[in-house]
Amino acid sequence: MTLSASDIAAIRAAEEGLAASFEAPDPTAWVPYYTEDAIFSGPGSATIVGRAGLLEIAPQVVISSMQIAAESTIGDGDFAATFGRATWASGTKDSDAPVVRRRFLMVWRREADGHWRIARELLSEDD
């Protein structure tokens, strides 16, 4: 069983929600887009394990103008993997903050509530 068009649409909607959540008044608004057992690894930083770990670092994460561009998504059943690129300003909106460019691999899992959440994320430098 491959992913349906509605599964892909739900994942794209989750990506859009994640990107928008970084500009929410609540600095932890992006964390629920990850599973309880999520693992996040990015260049130059320690691997973060679990939603609890993400909640610990959330107040220090200041990101705006995030754009997520999925290049391919594959999956089966309740799992999907998306490869793509992301850009964001590493600071508040309209702050002239530096722009960050990354490649990503996100592993999504559909949870019991029907929502797709990121279970694993790996970021790397983009050329």
Image: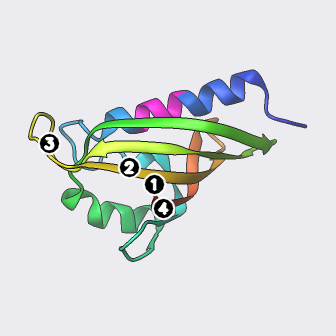
Q: Residue furthest right?
A: 1
Please report the residue visible at 15 percent of the width from the left and 46 percent of the height from the top.
97
- Cα separation, mark 4 vs mark 3, equals 22 Å
Q: Secondary structure at mark 3?
A: loop
> Where residue 76 sits: x, y (%)?
82, 43
Which quadrant of the figure has residue 93? top left
Left or right: residue 110 versus residue 69 is right
Which quadrant of the figure has residue 105? bottom right
Q: Which residue does the numbered mark 3 point to in the structure image?
A: 92
Among numbered discs 4 and 3, the one appearing first in the sequence: 3
Label 1 close to label 3 by CB (< 8 Å): no
Please report the residue visible at 28 percent of the width from the left and 65 percent of the height from the top.
57
The quarter of the image holding the C terminus is: bottom left
- Residue neighbourhood size for the residue with mark 4, other residues' Cα within 10 Å, grouped as few (<14), some (14–19), many (≥20): some
Q: Is residue 19 above or below residue 5?
A: below
Please report the residue visible at 63 percent of the width from the left and 24 percent of the height from the top.
9
Span highlighted in magenta in the image: 13-18
**Which residue occupies the foreground of this view, 111 or 45?**
45
Q: Amino acid at mark 2?
A: Arg
- Cα separation, mark 1 vs mark 3, equals 24 Å
Q: Which residue does the numbered mark 2 point to in the structure image?
A: 101
> Where residue 47 sits: x, y (%)?
45, 74
Residue 124's disc number: 4
- Cα separation, mark 2 vs mark 1, equals 8 Å
Q: Secondary structure at mark 2?
A: strand
Among numbered discs 1 and 3, the one appearing first in the sequence: 3
Left or right: residue 26 versus residue 68 is left
Q: Nearer the viewer, mark 2 or mark 1?
A: 1
Left or right: residue 12 versus residue 109 is left
Q: Which residue does the numbered mark 1 point to in the structure image?
A: 127
